[in-house]
Amino acid sequence: MDNFLLIFIIILLYILFLFVIQYIGIGSKKRSSNSNNCCPDCKGTLKRVKRFFKDKIIYYLTLVMFDWRRYNCDKCGWEGLRWSKQYGLKNN
C-alpha cells in the first residue's frame, strides 16, 4: 500500500474519531440541578485552575475542536479537563 494513502486514511480516521467523541460528549461539562459545571465524581461545583503545558498540547492535538479547560473540585479533589458543548453561535 502506498505510504501517502496510508497516512491519509489514518488522518481521516483520526478526524472521524474526534467528531464521534464530540457527538457523544466524552469529557464535556456535566450539569446538575445546582451547577452548570459539576464534578463527575461527587456532583460538586468545579472551579477553574490554570492550564498546564500538556493541556495546551492536547488542545492542539484535538485540532482546536474542543475548548479544553482545567477544573478542580474542592469537595473530593478531582482535577481534570472539561470542554463545553457549543450548539450554535450567539446572536448579538
Image: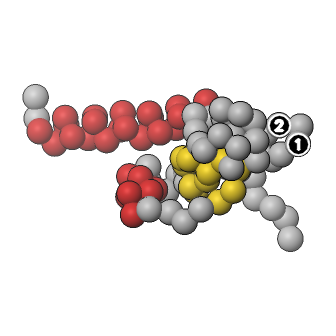
Q: Does residue 38 appear in the picture of this structure?
A: no
Q: CA distance from mark 2 to mark 1?
A: 5 Å
Image coordinates for residue 36, horizontal then vertical, percent: 81, 47
Image coordinates for residue 47, horizontal then vertical, percent: 69, 56
Say left or right for 46 vs 71: right
Say left or right for 44 vs 10: right
User: Marks 1 and 2: in contact by CB < 8 Å?
Assistant: yes
The amino acid on which the numbered mark 2 sits, given as a three-letter code, is Ser
**Quarter of the rendering occupied by the N terminus:** top left
Foreground residue, 91 or 66? 66
Q: Residue furthest right?
A: 33
Q: Does residue 20 appear in the picture of this structure?
A: yes
Residue at image point 28% right, 36% down: 10
The amino acid on which the numbered mark 1 sits, given as a three-letter code, is Asn
* Secondary structure under the numbered disc 2 in the rendered image: loop
Crowding near pointer 1: few (<14 within 10 Å), some, many (20+)? Answer: few
Residue at image point 21% right, 40% down: 7
**Count of all numbered marks drawn on residues in the image:** 2
Residue at image point 28% right, 35% down: 9
* Secondary structure under the numbered disc 1 in the rendered image: loop
Foreground residue, 50 or 6? 50
Residue at image point 53% right, 34% down: 21
Q: Which mark is residue 32?
A: 2
What colour scheme has been applied to the protein in the rendered image? secondary structure
Image coordinates for residue 15, horizontal then vertical, percent: 42, 41
Image coordinates for residue 70, horizontal then vertical, percent: 56, 55
Mark 1 lies on residue: 34
Foreground residue, 4 or 29? 29
